[in-house]
Amino acid sequence: MKIMIRRAPDSGLSIYVPKKDLEESIVESEHETLWGGWIKIANGWVLDLPQMASDTRLPVTINAKKRGENGDDP
């Protein structure tokens, strides 16, 4: 799914999912630089992010994969 990651002044990093009209804070991440690992957002979703350069500038729109409900969450 396409998501936009941006730096929010009040809550750190957040994502926006246009097709769901959903904006949530990122509450946990596998890697400090985000890229190539998973992130967890405030509503409980876990998303896998693509590998990108650690100095990728925000905001950025990327394709992320939502992890399923079958126990593959971190």
Image: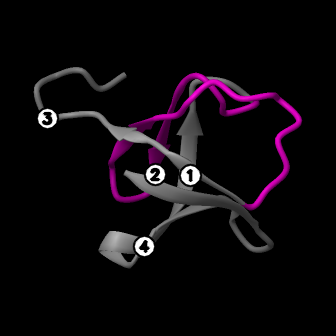
Say whether residue 68 is left or right of residue 35: left
Circle 4 residue: 18
Q: Quick one: 57 or 43, which is closer to the camera?
A: 57
Q: Residue furthest bottom?
A: 21
Say whether residue 54 is left or right of residue 13: right
Kindly check if marks 2 and 1 are in contact, taking CB atoms under 8 A apart as contact.
yes
Circle 3 residue: 69
State the separation of the CA atoms marked 4 and 2: 15 Å
Q: Residue at x 69, y 66 (%)?
A: 11
Circle 1 residue: 26
Assign a secondary structure to mark 4. Answer: helix
Assign a secondary structure to mark 1. Answer: strand
Circle 2 residue: 41
Q: Point out residue 20 in the picture as x, y percentages from the top left corner.
A: 31, 72
How many residues crowd around disc 3 within 10 Å: few (fewer than 14), some, or many (20 or more)?
A: few
The three-letter amino acid code for the residue at tag 1 is: Ile
Q: Which of labels 4 and 2 is toward the front?
A: 4
In reply to whether residue 1 is colored magenta, the answer given is no
Chain-order first, disc 3 or disc 1: 1
The three-letter amino acid code for the residue at tag 4 is: Pro
Assign a secondary structure to mark 2. Answer: strand
Kindly check if marks 4 and 2 are in contact, taking CB atoms under 8 A apart as contact.
no
Residue 28 position (above or below residue 12): above
State the separation of the CA atoms marked 3 and 1: 19 Å
